[in-house]
Amino acid sequence: MIYLTRLNEKALVVNCDQIEFIEATPNTVISMTTGRKIVVSESIDEVIVKVVEYKKKVFGPNYPIIKYQGNEV
């Protein structure tokens, strides 16, 4: 689970295992596998970093580092 922020600045917690895809339209819209869409104030890159950090907590520090647009997360 990762903490994110709605556009009205209220916090929410998202099950990152249910994220299907993320798009910027220009707000960041997270589409869940359930069909629900969530608009958050974090950028796509910030969401990705939060997901990878969460996965490292769950699976350990050797969780694979990925490269996204030249940045390591």
Image (cartoon, grey):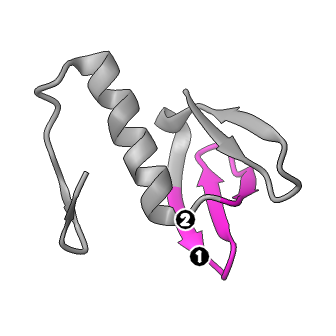
Where residue 4 appears, as percent x and y from the top left, is 65, 43
Vertical arrangement, residue 72 with respect to residue 50, above or below: below
Element on which disc 2 rests: loop
Label 1 Cα neighbours within 10 Å, binned few <14 / some 14-19 / many ≥20: few
Q: Nearer the viewer, residue 58 or 21?
A: 58
Q: Earlier in the sequence, mark 2 or mark 1?
A: 1
Based on the displayed image, in which of its 4 quarters is residue 67 positioned? bottom left
Q: Nearer the viewer, residue 38 or 9?
A: 9
- Residue receiving disc 2: 43
Q: Is residue 59 left or right of residue 13?
A: left
Where residue 8 appears, as percent x and y from the top left, is 89, 55
Based on the displayed image, in which of its 4 quarters is residue 30 positioned? bottom right
Q: Amino acid at mark 2?
A: Ser
Circle 2 or circle 1, nearest the eye: 2
Vertical arrangement, residue 71 with respect to residue 9, above or below: below
- The question of residue 58 being in magenta is answered with no
Name, please, the residue furthest toward the front: 9
Q: Which residues are magenta?
A: 21-41
Vertical arrangement, residue 7 with respect to residue 36, above or below: below
Where residue 73 appears, as percent x and y from the top left, is 25, 51
- The question of residue 35 being in magenta is answered with yes
Element on which disc 1 rests: strand
Q: Nearer the viewer, residue 13 or 30?
A: 13
- Residue receiving disc 1: 24
| Quadrant location of the N terminus in the rendered image | top right
Callouts 2 and 1 close, C-beta under 8 Å:
yes
Vertical arrangement, residue 59 with respect to residue 49, above or below: above
